[in-house]
Structures are given as C-alpha cells and as structure tokens.
Amino acid sequence: MTVRRQPLSQTQTRVLDLLSAAGRPLSAYDLLGKLRGEGVNAPPTVYRALEKLVREGLVHRIESLNAFVACSTPHHHDMATFAICDQCGLVTELTDRPLQEQLAAMSSRSGFHATRMMVELRGHCAACAAKAHGHGASDHAH
Ligand SMILES: [Zn+2]
Ligand SMILES: [Zn+2]
C-alpha cells in the first residue's frame, strides 16, 4: 500500500475511480457528464480534481487527445509513454527506464532542463493490426 502525501477529496476519489473503471482516456467533459448525477455540476471542481490527480502522479494527461487516463503502473512520473490506437482508441501505458535515461541525457547535453517528458505513439494496437491483416488489409488507404 502506498502512502499519499494528502488524502484525496471525495470528488478526486470519484474522478480517479471513473478513470480506472473506464480503462480508456476520458475528457474533463466526459467526467463532468458522469459526475453530474452525483451532485458535481461545476466544471472547475472537475478540473481542480484532475489537476491534483495529475500532480500526485495518479492520472496522466494525454496531450494529443486532450483527455485523462488513470496511471496503470507505479513509475517515475516525470516520464510517461503512451501507445494510442487510432482505430479503436485503446491507450496503453508503456514504461521504459532506459528510454527515460536517454531522453534525460539528450536534453541535458543540449543544456535543456526537462521536468516532464511525455511520449505519445500513434498507430494500431496489436488486435487492430491483426484484424487489418486478417481482412486483406483493406484499411491501409489513409
Ligand atoms: Zn503512469
Ligand atoms: Zn486498436
């Protein structure tokens, strides 16, 4: 069990639960829609909860989707890598320490002090890639 610096508020806990249960990225708007029936009606409340969860390393913001996803694995949160399927929307969090070290070394060689590194890979997940091949690869035309 991990010890958190500060306990999460009720809204923060609900947002984290919803993201964990969804298993896919949700936008702040999606979350607000789900929380509306529970008495959370103010967008700033949801944004603040998301900000806090991102700071605590429990949730990641996927910049290219403008959406949030629950962290799937404990790791150093200054670095996160995501594989995003353009076909079905599946997002997989990948962790690779050597990659993190290489990126840190590369940026410090140029004198840049990176505090946060996000790598987003776009393409097709294993299932969608297999499907495309099985069906004569008809959707390669884009
Ligand atoms: Zn993570
Ligand atoms: Zn897919």
Image: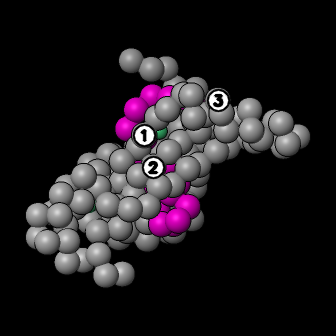
Of residue 45 and residue 98, the one placed in the foreground of this image is 98
Disc assigned to residue 101: 3
Residue located 19% across and 67% down the image? 132
Relative height, residue 65 to residue 12 (above, below): below
Report if the beta carbon of the residue with label 3 is closer than 8 angstroms to ligand 1. no
User: Quadrant of the rendered structure where residue 88 is?
Assistant: bottom left
**Residue range of the region highlighted in magenta in the rendering:** 60-76
Per the model, the C-alpha gap separating discs 3 and 1 is: 15 Å
Please state the horizontal and vertical placement of residue 25, each as a whole percent of the image: 38, 58
Q: Residues within 10 Å of mark 2 (few under 14, many from 20)?
A: some
Q: Can I make out residue 115 in this image?
A: yes
Q: Are marks 2 and 1 in contact (CB under 8 Å)?
A: yes
Q: Residue at x 50, y 45 (%)?
A: 81
Quarter of the picture holding the C terminus: bottom left
Q: Position of residue 125 (x, y in %)?
A: 29, 55
Report the amino acid beneath label 3: Glu
* Residue type marked 2: Phe
